[in-house]
Image: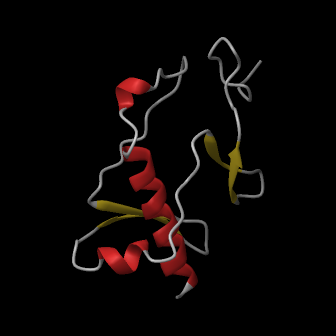
Amino acid sequence: MTARASTLLAAAVMATSALATPASAQAPAAGATPWVLTPDMGYGYDADGRTFAYKMGTNNAKFLLKGAKKVPKNTLFFIGENGQLYMRSGPFLESDGRFKFGPG
C-alpha cells in the first residue's frame, strides 16, 4: 500500500469514527467549531502536507477497512510549527470545558 493510500485510509477511518458518536451526546467547548464529516467522503493528508477530500464509493469498503484502526475518543489533531500533522490522545479540555491549549 502506498503512503498516499495509507494516509487516505487513516483519514477515512478518522472520519468514520467521528460519525459513530451522536453529536447530541457531546457538549461543544466554547469557541469549538464542529467538523463536517460525511460517511461518503474520504479525507487525506498527503506526503507534502496537503489535505484533500475525496468522494468515496462502496464497492471497495472491505479493502478500505482492512488494516484500519479506530481513532480513540479524546483525540486531538493539530499541525505543529514544523507543518507536520500530529495527534494527541487524552483530555484536551479543562474541567470547566475550556480548551486546555488555547490562548491565555
Q: Toward the viewer: 3 or 52?
A: 3
Residue 70 x, y percent position in the rendering:
52, 58
Residue 35 x, y percent position in the rendering:
42, 40
Q: Is residue 22 above or below residue 39?
A: above
Q: Locate residue 75: give its quadrant.
A: top right
- Would residue 104 appear left or right of 43 to someone viewing this image? right
Q: Locate residue 41: give its quadrant.
A: bottom left
Residue 28 x, y percent position in the rendering:
49, 22
Q: Toward the viewer: 87 or 90?
A: 90
Q: Residue at x 54, y 87 (%)?
A: 2
Q: Is residue 61 above or below residue 86?
A: below
Residue 16 x, y percent position in the rendering:
39, 54
Number of marks in the image? 0
Q: Residue at x 45, y 77 (%)?
A: 66
Q: Is residue 96 above or below residue 58?
A: above
The quarter of the picture where the C terminus appears is top right
